[in-house]
Amino acid sequence: MTQAYDSQRVRDYLLDLQHRIVSALERLDGQSFLTDAWQREPGGRLEGDGITRLIENGAVFERGGCNFSHVRGRVLPPSATQHRPELAGAPFEAMGVSLVLHPHNPFVPTVHMNVRMFAALPAGAEPVVWFGGGMDLTPYYGFERDAQHFHRSCRAALQAHGEPLYPQFKQWCDEYFFLKHRNEPRGVGGIFFDDYAQGGFEPSFALMRSVGDAFMGAYEPIVQRRQGLAYGERERDFQAYRRGRYVEFNLVFDRGTLFGLQSGGRTESILMSMPPQVSWRYDWAPEPGTQEARLYSDFLRPRDWADETPTHLWL
């Protein structure tokens, strides 16, 4: 779809979003994020700049990052053209904010959020612009109240842009964050969208802003509810085991990771999403009737979370 775009407006918004999210997370954790600003030398495979904001061994977050990047390249990588083969070989501009948080406490879920813009710049033609993003929740121990709140926040973020978007983007998220080799969802989902350009630049940009602006309201109440719960070695072991699924998805299926690596992106920033402690076990399954088993039976399957009524209001 041909459309005009304003690169500077998107950049200004994304930098402000990163600042607002990191400031809120620093208040939540009590520890400051480090700042690693970077810039690529002109004339290389990729040009551009970015800011990596990272926390490790904080009070709440064992590891987490919130990255801004803005790059320009001579040729779109394959991961960006699999649905748009006519743009293969075109130069491009891409920018976005990507966030992953891995808490210490196994009762606090891992969370991922990303908002981004791509512009293909074919010679002799108008730019082709599209947006993508979303957020999804990956609990280790399931709480219905948390999944319901997260999905209702996602639905509210999309409401002004059309009633059909939440069910469409929820289903897209359920299908995208699915480990095919495990036949298993990564978590309880959320929303996901890509190649979005409905109505042109302005409404698409507005949709991206709504998703980015909704993140802290979707996640912070869950952290505040669960951070004080006591846990032991058993819970940490299960957390490390389930984190292995997160690593598998990011390295095998995630389009953002593949795009960054295929385009010659900054490896430290791309792999910021990896958890600090992780383990794998051979042919393991939780004991029936345990909290660990309930994650599989009750939570790792598609559910209409936003429309459900909590059955355990105290949790």
Image (cartoon, helix red, strand yellow):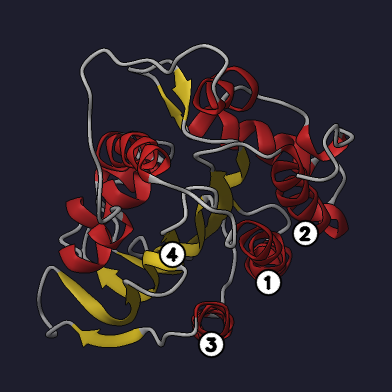
Q: Mark 4 sits on what residue?
A: 98
How crowded pointer 3 is (Cα within 10 Å; few <14, some 14-19, many 20+) is rated as: few
Q: Give me the residue at 61% from left, 36% from top.
A: 142
Label 3, label 2: how many angstroms apart (C-alpha)? 21 Å
SS state under label 2: helix
Of circles 3 and 4, the one toward us is 4
Is 174 rendered above or below residue 267? above
In front of the other: 159 or 229: 229
Pointer 4 or 1: first along the chain: 4
What is the C-alpha distance between the residues marked 3 and 1? Answer: 14 Å
At which x and y percent is residue 187?
A: 53, 36
Q: Quadrant of residue 131?
A: bottom right
Q: Position of residue 46 (x, y in %)?
A: 18, 71
Asked which secondary structure carries label 4, the reply is strand
Dots 3, 2 in contact, CB < 8 A: no
Q: Residues within 10 Å of mark 4 (few under 14, many from 20)?
A: many
Tell me how many marks there are. 4
Residue 121 in which image quadrant: bottom left
Q: CA distance from mark 2 to mark 1?
A: 8 Å
Residue 195 seen from this side: no
**What amino acid is labelled 3 in the image?**
Asp
Closer to us: 83 or 275? 275
* Mark 4 vs 2, N-terminal side: 4
Disc sitting over residue 127 in the figure: none
* Residue placed under numbered mark 3 in the picture: 12
- Residue occupied by mark 1: 213
Q: Tell me the amino acid under the disc marked 4.
A: Ser
Q: Which residue is mark 2?
A: 157
Q: Residues within 10 Å of mark 1 (few under 14, many from 20)?
A: some
